[in-house]
Amino acid sequence: LKRLVALRTCNFVNIKPLRCRGSGVSYEIRMQMGEKRTSLNDRTASILIDSIVLAPPTDELFISQGLSAADRHRMEYDRYQCRSQHMSLTPQADLSEVCSRYICPVSAMLFNRSLECDCDPTGSLSGICSVKGGQCDCKPNIVGRRLCDRCAVGTYGFGPSGCTACGCDSVGALSNNCDRQSGQCLCRERGITGRQCNQCQPGFWSFPDCRVCQCNDHASICDQKTGACIECRDLTDGYYCDRCKDGYYGDPRLGINLPCKPCPCPGGLDSGFQHADTCYLRPSEENEAPDVICNCKAGYTGERCASCAVNHWGNPNELGGTCEPCDCNGNIDVLVEGSCDPVSGDCIKCLHNTEGIQCEDCIEGYYGDAKIRSCQRCVCNDLGTNRTAGTCDRVTGQCPCLPNVVGQQCDTCAPQHFDLASGKGCEPCECDPAGVRLNADGTPELQCNEFDGRCMCKPGRGGRTCSDCEDYHWGDPTTGECRRCECNPIGSATQQCDRNNGSCVCLPGSGGPLCNMCARGYTGQWPHCEACGECFQNWDEIVQNLKNQAATLIETANNIEDTGIVSVYDDAFEKMEATLTDLKTQLESANITRSDINELQAEIDNLRKNVRMSLGARTTEISSSVDKADVELKSLTAEVEKLSQKSEALKENATLLREADVQGAYNISRESAEKSAAAKRRIDQADTKITNAESERQEAISLLENNQLDFEKQFKENEMVLLTGFESMLPALNRDVCGAESAPCDQLCGGPGACGHCGGPSCLSGSVRKAEKAKLFAEEADQKLNEKQKEAEEILARVREILQHTSVTKGKAMDGHDIADAAAKQANLTRTSLEEMVAQMNEFLNSDQRSSPEQIRALAEEIMGATISLTPDQIQELANKIREKLMNINNIDIILNETRGNKTIAEALQKSAESASMRAAEISSCQTKISVRFYCAFYKKEKKTIVLCMLFTSFNPFFCA
């Protein structure tokens, strides 16, 4: 057995004397690794070993070439330390030129031939290798000392593209190595899975802790990061599968476990009349089943959504039935119940002055578009509107106008018409085109004044239509023969004479063409005319009537030649003849003689003479007064002209004022008229309803009085029939209820009413006895349910206690693990000082420099003078303490057996404890090795001997893994 110790700074060791000399002999090489030199517990630390090479000595390679040449080559080979450079894996670029030159000769002498490249075609970039060493040019992550024929450590998937890094998770995997084919990393035993060991096993989440999914037994897996349950079963949903899906109700949580059922809203999901997407259980009183409350869709109401909401219509309880919002074009208050019919959907309480099934029309007296709520009151001019034709158009607002009246409100006469104020329509202006002024375009102005109808006359023309001479003139204006009126201002009613013949309009008593003489029926000297008296007026009236009748007869007679004699006039002639006869008789019967008439005539002459005499002086006075009056008249005439001008101006202003004010006055009058009409309509409607109600009431009273006796008689007969039927049914009812078919009372089972009891122990067929038995069964079942409930609560309490005990056990195991780690750290500190001292010794002994014996002796004395921080007894005591700590956690198996109910947690704790136990064993082993090595080094120190023991390696060695 040959023990070698490799130094940190060296990749190879020389074995002296040589051990591998026997042909056909098997040799075993063992490698022992130490821990990383750090106080931190770094689980990512690892050692990668590429290869272990046993190189033969080179002293004998140069013998066959001749003594002088061999010595020269050997000296040169040793002087440049080529063996040390080659064995320490110095890169070729850093080799000295001499040592680089010896690579091929030494290799050829070792193998006795040159070697082919033999590069792997899959792992190599080409088939050409390095001349020195034969190393092929490998693809990414592919290695092989020469051939590039395998994946590098920590990679997998050897192929044309190279190898892929394993990517093993530093926490979930034991190392970064993986399967060369599949890439599967070696996971720690803590519920960790996945190719890279970066996931929890199904049923766990929150890598790397890997906690159990909490899904209330309704799902097997959950989200690896959030813990949200995936693919909930049993119609459940939610983060923890703790609620029912939409459209179902229940309580699927553990401990309650009410299965999820379809929401009855009202018919269920597949019924064809389901009006809610979700529902819930409303808490109820004790011993009562909870009620299902539906979250109804818009338009439905009720606990089961079996009714339409306010202002919705339809039949939600029939197959395919729905509740639709009432389509009233926005003209109802959706918050006011009863605004539309819940069955037909017809609108009832229309707003915004609308009416109709959908409130699509404006009410009478309003116009506009009801669908956009723009109905407004009709505004119709009373003077121009035909009230017998109804109200305005409900869409355009056009009022029904009288003839020749236009405008939406009937407030304007048609062109060339006037007199809207007549209330009968407008009359045509009929202006004479030849007598009116011309417009700017040269056309006649045919529009007259809209109030009085006067046309715009040109100079020399007058009259309302401008077809006459100008005012105060008469004649034919077409020929230019217009003469001034000469009406006497005293006897004339107006200065305007007849425009055709010039005759004046006289005041009463005045007459003649110029109103300057006494009129017929008056006597005296004009202008002092007096009426002849009542007698004359009567006779004059009679005579004028007769005259008129005679004129009519003459005209009729003149027409006889054309029309013939009509017998229908015979009666008229006879009446006229009778009238004439009566007049003749009255005249003949009068007692007036010729002498009487003469006397009367003489008296009249005397009276006239006296009047003339008395009037003479008066006439003189009047003449002077007339002269004065003439002067005053002239002044008054001037004033009249001024007043006339002012009057014309005032007239124009008045016209403008009337035009401006007529609309305001009309609006006030119209509103008052509408209010009155509306009040009248309401009164008329109320009167009609009252009258109808009164007549119906009277009819109802009459019907009641006429049929009262029949009603009473029929009621008594029905009552007797019912009593007879009930009496025949009593035995059967008594049998079904009380258990005995007898009436009215049975001695054993009793009966209804005054019997005092119903049913008994022997009355087994009665519903009363059956109900009592059912009550007893129900009470027993309830008692058993209570007992089961208590047992379940006890089991749940025990499970919770076990979970708590498991948590305590896990804590104890973690404490033991921490103690073991602390012990390992203390051992590492002890080992470090020893290892440094041994390394110094090996570095000195392995140095290629030729040291003198004095230097070697000085170094040996320095090494022997060094001290070790711990004695072997102290190290042994530390190992005993570790063993005692490990003994404290040997009861893990017992605890796990007690907590077998929670299998997953117990297994995780068991794995943690086993890992801690293995770690403690490794620390114990490491401590034993340190102790043995310490004794070895101490013994050699006392004997003052130094032994070189090293393996040729390409890594830094450690004592413990």
Image (cartoon, grey):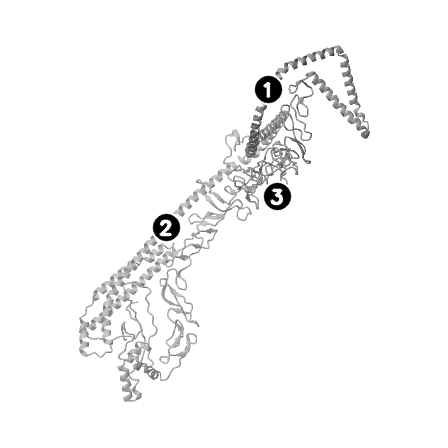
Instruction: Choose top left, top right, bottom left or bottom right for residue 521.
Output: top right
- Can you say whether 878 is above or below 348 in the image? below
State whether residue 955 appears in this view. Answer: yes
Which mark is drawn over residue 624? Answer: 1
Which callout, 2 or 3, points to the residue nearer the camera? 3
| Residue 768, percent from left and from top | 51, 36
Residue count near mark 3 (Cα–Cα under 10 Å), binned few <14, some 14–19, many ≥20? few
Whole-angstrom CA distance, mark 2 to mark 1, is 147 Å
Q: Are marks 3 and 1 in contact (CB under 8 Å)?
A: no
Q: Where is mark 3, residue-wise?
A: 441
Q: Amino acid at mark 1?
A: Ser
Q: Amino acid at mark 2?
A: Arg
Instruction: Choose top left, top right, bottom left or bottom right for residue 210.
Output: bottom left
Which mark is drawn over residue 3? Answer: none
| Residue 883, percent from left and from top | 27, 62
Quadrant of the image containing the N terminus: bottom left
Q: Is residue 553 left or right of residue 753?
A: right
